[in-house]
Image (cartoon, helix red, strand yellow):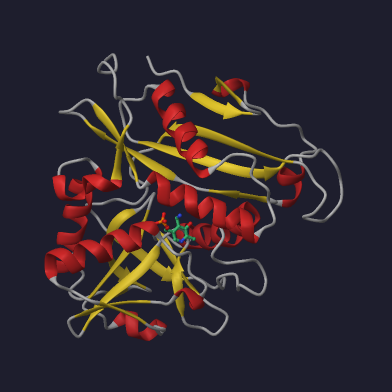
Amino acid sequence: MPTPTAFFQGQYVPLEDAKIGVMTHAFNYGTAVFEGVRGNWNDEEGQLYLFRVRDHIRRVLESSKIMRLGVQYSEDEIVTTVERVAEMSGFREDVYIRPLVYKSDEVVGLRMHNLAEDFLVFVTPFGAYLDPEAGVRCVTSSWRRVDDTMIPARAKVTGLYVNNAMAKTEAELNGVDEAIMLNQDGHVSEGSGENIVMMRHGRLVTPPPSDNILEGITLETALEIAKRELGLEVERRTIDRSELYIADEVFMTGTAAHVTPVTEIDRIPIGDGEFGEVSRLLQRRYFEAITGRIPEYADWLTPVYTGAAVEA
Ligand code: PMP
């Protein structure tokens, strides 16, 4: 049986014992940064593979630096802690691991300085976030993506995510799967939890970091696969909303969302409304890579169960 485990206040504890107080600064003001790392289950091997765990930990350390959040652990220590939490939890299915650095003082007052901080990790089972077979139906959100002059857009700040949550809810209440958020200038930024890529005139195009995107690890992965396997280069430039409508293909990338083709935007079919060839291939190769089925991409993976096979 799995035993969901957390790393909390410097110790490995059962998940149900990892609780914060109601006055915790991060809970009241969103003063925390986080990551999402996927563990992908390979049933034939009885193995759980963490995907690009070190890259996620580097990003949480960058987010912490931007937000003036001190972290009392080194990069190596955090990587080891994430691996250990996954191993101790013993899941035999896809999981999502959440490292989080937060202002832990139980005090009222708006500031980022002179506050205690702590680090925690938890893990939870997590299946498909967007339907990989059906693809994604999107609307352009009426909520603009937060600007870097408001909240650092390249940092995964918990408080920032109300922006994304509002966009996602608007999309779902309008009967589709996902929102596409425009930036303050009205150009395409990203999904509520995914980066966005289009295929146009035989090239892959994605917005630059200065359009307030999160610098996605899945995005880099998909672009790397596209380069190695299809010889496709990427152009990073500003994209207009109307340009997406006439793209040959559009797909979204994200730790939760994997690589998932977009079939329509604002009720306009993308291409012929079916999965495009490039999106389909990238989606397939990405799934094979993250579940340990492509030796060439094994460097991206950390097997969790190194000792005896985990009990069924
Ligand atoms: N944009 C946002 C707003 C996100 O939350 C995420 C998920 N972390 C992404 C893009 C995709 O990033 P990644 O591929 O690194 O998960």
Q: Decide which of 271, 112 is in the foreground and name it.
A: 112
Instruction: Name the residue located 75 percent from the left edge and 32 percent from the top edge.
Output: 21
Q: Quadrant of residue 105?
A: top right
Q: Which quadrant of the figure shows ligand 1? A: bottom left
Q: Is residue 276 visible?
A: no
- State the image coordinates of residue 22 (x, y, percent, origin top left): 77, 35
* 259 with respect to 64 (left or right): left
Q: Decide which of 164, 285 is in the foreground and name it.
A: 285
* 141 with respect to 53 (left or right): right
* 17 with respect to 179 (left or right): right
Q: Is residue 274 above or below residue 159?
A: below
- State the image coordinates of residue 70 (x, y, percent, origin top left): 68, 48
List the single residue furthest toward the right: 108
- State the image coordinates of residue 123 (x, y, percent, origin top left): 47, 32
Instruction: Name the residue located 66 percent from the left edge and 75 percent from the top edge.
Output: 149
Q: Is residue 44 visible?
A: yes
Instruction: Name the residue located 20 percent from the left edge and 66 percent from the top edge.
Output: 226
- State the image coordinates of residue 118 (x, y, percent, origin top left): 67, 38
Q: Is residue 136 above or below residue 150?
A: above
Q: Quadrant of residue 103?
A: top right
Instruction: Name the residue located 25 percent from the left edge and 74 percent from the top edge.
Output: 270
Q: Quadrant of residue 94?
A: top left
Q: Is residue 58 above or below residue 97?
A: below
User: Quadrant of the image for the N terminus?
Assistant: top left
User: Quadrant of the image for the C terminus?
Assistant: top left
